Image (cartoon, rainbow, N blue to C red):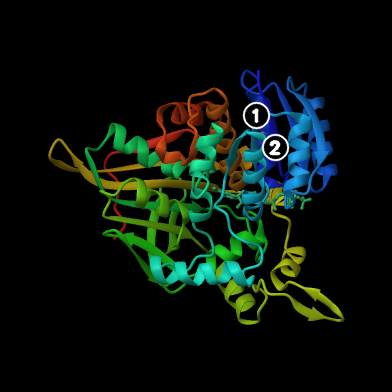
Amino acid sequence: MSRLLVIGCGGVAQVAIQKCAQNSKVFTQMCLASRTVSKCDALKDKLEKKGCPVEITTATVNADDVNDLVKLIKEYKPDAVLNVALPYQDLTIMDACLECKVDYIDTANYEPEDTDEPVWRAAYEKRCKEKGFTAYFDYSYQWAYMDKFKEAGITGLLGTGFDPGVTSVFVAYAKKHYFDEIETVDILDCNGGDHGYAFATNFNPEINLREVSANGSYWENGKWVETKPMEIKREYDFPEVGMKDMYLLHHEEIEALGRNFPEIKRIRFFMTFGQSYLDHMRCLEDVGMLSTSPVMFEGREIVPIQFLKALLPDPASLGPRTVGKTNIGCIFRGTKDGKEKTVYIYNVCDHQECYKELGSQAISYTTGVPAMIGTALVLEGKWKKPGVYTTDEFDPDPYMEMLGEFGLPWVVDENPVMVP
Ligand code: NDP
């Protein structure tokens, strides 16, 4: 018996909520709350028409406002809050969970909406110099809640999507079952899907474009090595997808893995992009459309990237038209019983299969399923530990089992082609 409050009702949330509904032995009651309550009502109707056994209510909430969140949490009295709104709301939702002593789960690292805000900017510039990477997001803001969450006796599970999330569980699983010592990890995120548009993003455009237009970086010998955006390119022949170009990006799980597995000498993250996506992105960046700084337009202030978001296809609408597969996983090199070995653990997910099952494309699907799994493990007490943790800090076995059970089976290849 557990009550879950879900905040956000976008692409990822729609999958996470439907997957919670499939797991009614853990989730018995759910409140779906977002800025636009009509989206929550529509999903509630869809689930109820299918005979969903979970009791569902809906609510409007402004997740930027701690008081509004606290009011809703006190009214609904959930056992946990799943944040599948945007990374901008991580800290307000964590504050509200702390005040109400309720477990907190999310899928993405905090980043501020306004990167020009002076106090945040000063701390950011100091961090860039000290740590050597320039991404807008880092774990320091959420790790700072460790003692407060411990004192309150509540669990904060950070980043339980696919990457981060499953990729970090793959690292913990490889360490537990395949290696005495891991030396290198390459995280490969391949989307072989085709939606037929010249340009669209697979999840929230603002978050997605910020991430991929930023400098790349990787972790080597305890330090960050930063690269220009898209500076490092490799080709890889992905199982069930085929040959793709992929580019090195900074990615949030590297920070947690570098801290939690100090033995790992190098951690890199690569994502595949087609030429059309890159050409569009470069052009949009060159004309200032990816900027998060407000500009005046015909007497009113607009934020260019938010305006662009309004023009681009809604990621939630890509489901019916996207064909092809994703392949996301980790390639490891290390040693076991004194011998060098390599292992590749990956999941392949088919866009059209996801659409048939839940009405979503594979990017939302591969994020929403692990969001449900992490939440279930916290609620069942298997991953309950006061404090704030990433997914690599718990026993990976129950999570891996649930991946298979809830639609993301994985493959272990003990003789993979390595990335040069
Ligand atoms: P969407 O933009 O589709 O959905 C975001 C939802 O949050 C919308 O329902 C939106 O409401 C709601 N929301 C936004 N601001 C507020 C607010 N202030 N108060 C209440 N609700 C709000 O995003 P996605 O579903 O694509 O992404 C969700 C999260 O998943 C993001 O944090 C993203 O970074 C993360 N993600 C993680 C991945 C991983 O592998 N770890 C991969 C992909 C995404 P409204 O509809 O009214 O605007």
Whether residue 174 is situated above or below residue 262 in the rendered picture: above
Describe the element under mark 1 as helix, strand or loop. Answer: helix
Q: Is mark 2 within 8 Å of ligand 1?
A: no
Query: How busy is the neighbourhood of tag 1: few (under 14 within 10 Å), some, or many (20 plus)?
Result: many
Q: Which residue is located at x 75 percent, y 51 percent?
A: 65
Q: Residue 51's x, y, as percent?
A: 78, 21
Q: Is residue 181 left or right of residue 326?
A: left
Q: Residue at x 60, y 69 (%)?
A: 119
User: Which residue position holds label 1?
Assistant: 20
Check disc 2: other Cα within 10 Å, few if <14, some if 14-19, many if 20+. many
Where, quadrant-wise, is the C terminus in this rendering? bottom left
Residue at the image point whose x is 78% and y is 36% from the top = 43
**For this view, does 166 lie left or right of residue 80?**
left
Which quadrant of the figure has residue 75?
top right
Viewer-side residue, 176 vs 346: 176
The percent coordinates of residue 226 (x first, y second) are 39, 69
Q: In which quarter of the image is the N terminus?
A: top right
Q: Residue 176's image quarter?
A: top left
Q: Position of residue 81 (x, y in %)?
A: 65, 36
Separation of disc 1 and disc 2 at Cα? 10 Å
Residue under numbered circle 2? 6
Q: Are marks 1 and 2 in contact (CB under 8 Å)?
A: yes
Mark 2 residue element: strand
Write down the quadrant of residue 373 in the picture.
top right
Tag 2: residue type? Val
Decide if residue 109 is in sight here: yes
Q: Nearer the viewer, mark 1 or mark 2?
A: 2
Q: How many labels does the image show?
A: 2
Q: Can residue 275 be seen in this view?
A: no
Q: What residue type is labelled 1?
A: Cys
